[in-house]
């Protein structure tokens, strides 16, 4: 599928960011992308933010019928209604179904669309909006290795995509799905520390954000363990090791680990109540 025809059922921010990423990375042409949404004002915004050449429609069925890949990007609470609506259109011709709806299992989707449906479940995160997502995906039983390659290719256009068993998607939710919020809190705290030490607020905020960005890029580009990189900054008896000692006294690492575990457990609870 060199230039897949892609339908987004739901034209919100995440769908818009994905579509823009696909276009910018030349995954497919804008004319091959169509979006549908029950909330009509979303559609001109989607089209404008994706360059003006994508297609939009109020009809989910029209979107499905004019696509090879269907991305389910609606709220989880309306998923059941949507699946009932598109069931016959999906059954009439082979489609790859990609769901980015949190908590909706592959089994839930195949029970409504049919057991032979090719389904891939994706857990992206909000940095998708700036082309820096950290996403994981799981293949349903009928999805092919080629489907997996296509999804990995699509996600690589907006950041990172890695395959995991579906049972681990709750852990992905706890780590990378919720993780941006933890990082925002850390940036805010780092900035507050700078203000407490005498820096102007705007200067502290810029330095804090760029410090986190640069440190993350060092981990990605060097491939070195974060602990090794930390040790390279912390010279004996210096300022950094004094700061690290304070973080250890505050149980930073244990607290962050507990946050990931708490979010993971909450994701499991929500999945059970779907």
Image (cartoon, rainbow, N blue to C red):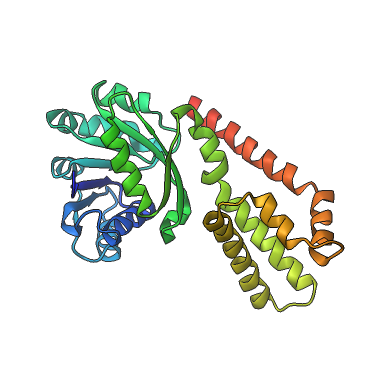
Q: What residue lies at 26% left-to-right and 36% top-to-bottom?
A: 146
Quarter of the image where one finds residue 143? top left
User: Left or right: where does residue 229 sit relative to residue 133?
Assistant: right
Quarter of the image where one finds residue 256? top right
In the rendered image, the quadrant that contains the N terminus is: top left
Q: Nearer the viewer, residue 55 or 233?
A: 233
Give percent across and percent down for residue 152: 35, 43
Give percent across and percent down for residue 22: 29, 55
Quarter of the image where one finds residue 190? bottom right
Give percent across and percent down for residue 10: 30, 47
Q: Quick check: can you spot residue 227?
A: yes
Q: What residue lies at 47% left-to-right and 56% top-to-bottom?
A: 127
Q: What residue lies at 78% left-to-right and 77% top-to-bottom?
A: 198
Give percent across and percent down for residue 192: 73, 67
> Considering only vertical position in the picture, is 247 above or below 101?
below
Q: What residue lies at 62% left-to-right and 40% top-to-bottom?
A: 260
In the rendered image, the quadrant that contains the C terminus is: top left
User: Left or right: where does residue 200 sit relative to residue 101?
Assistant: right
Q: Nearer the viewer, residue 238 or 195?
A: 238
Query: How many numbered circles are shown?
Result: 0
User: Left or right: where does residue 78 sit relative to residue 241?
Assistant: left
> Considering only vertical position in the picture, is 194 above or below 8?
below
Q: Quick check: can you spot residue 73?
A: no
């Amino acid at each position: 599928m060199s230039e897949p025809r892609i339908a987004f059922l739901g034209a919100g921010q995440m769908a818009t960011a994905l579509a823009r990423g696909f276009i910018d990375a030349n995954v497919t042409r804008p004319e091959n992308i169509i979006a549908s949404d029950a909330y009509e004002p979303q559609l001109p915004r989607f089209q404008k933010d994706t360059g003006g050449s994508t297609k939009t429609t109020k009809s989910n069925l029209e979107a499905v019928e004019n696509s090879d890949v269907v991305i389910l990007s609606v709220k989880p609470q309306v998923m059941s209604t949507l699946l009932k609506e598109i069931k016959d259109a999906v059954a009439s011709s082979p489609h790859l179904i990609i769901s980015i709806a949190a908590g909706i299992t592959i089994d839930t989707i195949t029970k409504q669309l049919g057991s032979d449906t090719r389904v891939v479940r994706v857990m992206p995160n909000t940095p998708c909006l700036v082309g820096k997502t950290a996403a994981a995906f799981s293949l349903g039983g009928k999805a092919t290795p080629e489907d997996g390659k296509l999804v990995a290719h699509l996600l690589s256009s907006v950041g990172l995509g890695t395959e995991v068993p579906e049972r681990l998607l709750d852990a992905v939710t706890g780590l990378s799905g919720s993780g941006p919020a933890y990082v925002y809190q850390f940036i805010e705290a780092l900035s507050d520390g700078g203000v407490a030490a005498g820096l102007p607020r705007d200067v502290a905020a810029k330095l804090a954000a760029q410090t986190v960005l640069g440190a993350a890029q060092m981990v990605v580009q060097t491939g070195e363990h974060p602990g090794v990189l930390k040790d390279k900054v912390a010279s004996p008896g210096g300022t950094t090791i004094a700061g690290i000692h304070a973080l250890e006294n505050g149980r930073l690492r244990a607290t962050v680990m507990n946050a990931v575990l708490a979010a993971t457990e909450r994701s499991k609870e929500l999945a059970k109540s779907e």
